[in-house]
Every structure is written in structure tokens, then in C-alpha cells.
Amino acid sequence: MASTFTPTPLVPGVLLTAGVTTYYTVPVGETLQINQLSVTNTDGLAHACYVYLCPTGALAGPSSLIWSGTLAPGQPFSVYQAIGAILGAGSTIQARSDASSVVSLQAGGVLFT
């Protein structure tokens, strides 16, 4: 059986909220390999940020936290812990910041069917 590989922009640059929010859900019947995930502080103040990779049905929490840190004003950061991660159907990319609309999240990957 042949597989289809589709490079996909997963999260095309969205501003995080202060509460944990789902920014991408792997479609039914597909598997995702993340090849890029980054956060950027767009504000003039430092901000804390949290990124989660959650298996199907799981809530964001300590077991799904892959990165947390404080970003300096204007600082971009490549969340290298996500690179190469494989997520099954229904799994999610979730994140939050300590303040809404100041930290940007961008992600890309390859979907396998």
C-alpha cells in the first residue's frame, strides 16, 4: 500500500492566548511528523510561554509539556524538542503564554496517510 506525504503549514503564525488553547489537531486517518515549531515574543516585555504535544484525548499538563521558557523582548525561539515528533490522528499541538496576543506560534510538518 502506497503512502502519501504532504508537507503542511500547521500553524501559520498565530498569537497565543493566556489560557491553554489547541492550535492544531491531526486529522483522522493521518499521522504527523513535525519539522518546524517556533515561538516569537512580539512584545517589548519578557513573557513566559508553554508548548504541549498532546496524544489523542489528553489534556495539556506536565506529561505533555515539551517546552517552557521565558522569551526576551523580540526573541524568537525554535522549539527543537518538537522537531521529528510523530503525532497520531487526534493528537494536538497546544500552547499558552503568560499574556494574550504577544507571543506568536508557527509550526509546519508532513502529514502521512
Image (cartoon, rainbow, N blue to C red):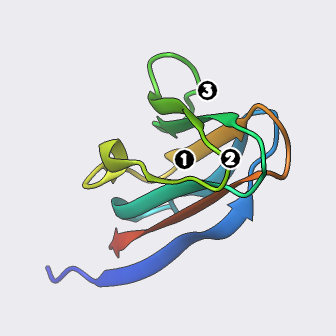
- What's the CA distance linking mark 3 and mark 1? 9 Å
User: Circle 3 — which element?
Assistant: loop
- Mark 3 — residue? 59
Q: Earlier in the sequence, mark 3 or mark 2?
A: 2
Residue at 77 percent of width and 41 percent of height? 45
Circle 2 packing at 10 Å, graded few (<14), some (14-19), many (20+), is some
Q: Which of the 4 image quadrants contains residue 14?
A: bottom right
Which amino acid does the dot numbered 2 rest on?
Answer: Thr
Is residue 24 found left or right of 30 in the rendered image?
A: right
Determine the residue positioned at 77% across, 31% down.
Answer: 98
Please tell me the numbered disc located at residue 22: 2
Q: Quadrant of the C terminus?
A: bottom left
Residue 102 position, x and y percent, is 79, 51
**Disc ID at residue 92:** 1
Give how far across and how far down residue 13 sits, in percent.
65, 69
The reply to whether callout 2 and callout 1 are in contact (CB within 8 Å) is yes
